[in-house]
Image (cartoon, helix red, strand yellow):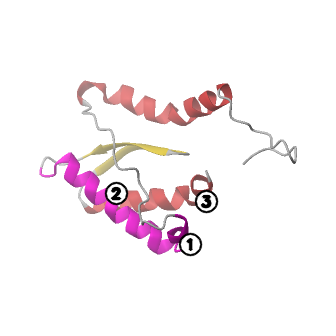
Amino acid sequence: MIIYNKLRKDIGQILRMLIERKGCELLEAEACPDHIHMLIEIPPKYSVAQFMGYLKSKSTLMIFDRHANMKYKFGNRKFWARGYFVDTVGCNEKALREYIQNQLQEDKLADQMSMKEFIDPFTGMPVK
């Protein structure tokens, strides 16, 4: 959550720059507190695994370079989770765009229905 609030914009800029460097196009994106949804158009000359390996490895190096204090929190220099989910779009592009656009609101609704505490029981203040 700390990363989400402080670095969301910078991580988005890094990802956009890396995507454009490969000649790909970011069509839609939404950063949630613990994951990112992206709709990316990748040319057929790249495999999905090749592109994702590039995106995750280069962005990790750039994030740690720009935010050196994070090296201590993530000492193993691994920022992203090991896996990722990929699906082809085809005829469902509009539905997928809407899903990505609404994902943050749906995550907030799910959090409201969870057992997560939004008030710190010790201070009585909202948890950020």
Locate residue 67 relative to residue 45 in the image: left or right.
right
Secondary structure mostly seen in the magenta stretch: helix
SS class of the residue under badge 1?
loop
Q: Which residue is mark 3?
A: 6
Q: Which residue is mark 2?
A: 56
Q: Position of residue 85 (x, y in %)?
A: 33, 38
Three-letter amino acid code at the position of disc 2: Lys
Between 72 and 57, the residue placed more toward the observer is: 72
Q: Position of residue 15 (x, y in %)?
A: 39, 57
Query: Per the image, is 109 magenta?
Result: no
Between 4 and 78, the residue placed more toward the observer is: 78
Of callouts 1 and 3, the N-terminal one: 3
Dividing the picture into quarters, in which one does residue 77 lie? bottom left
The residues bearing labels 1 and 3 have C-alpha atoms spaced at a distance of 13 Å
Q: Residue at x 52, y 45 (%)?
A: 34
The residues bearing labels 2 and 3 have C-alpha atoms spaced at a distance of 19 Å
- Residue 112 visible within the image: yes
Locate residue 46 relative to residue 126 in the image: left or right.
left
Where does the magenta region start and end?
Answer: 45-73
The residues bearing labels 2 and 1 have C-alpha atoms spaced at a distance of 19 Å
Three-letter amino acid code at the position of disc 3: Lys
Q: Which residue is mark 1?
A: 69
- Residue 30 visible within the image: no
Three-letter amino acid code at the position of disc 1: Asn
Please state which of the two labelled residues, at mark 1 or mark 3, is closer to the viewer: 1
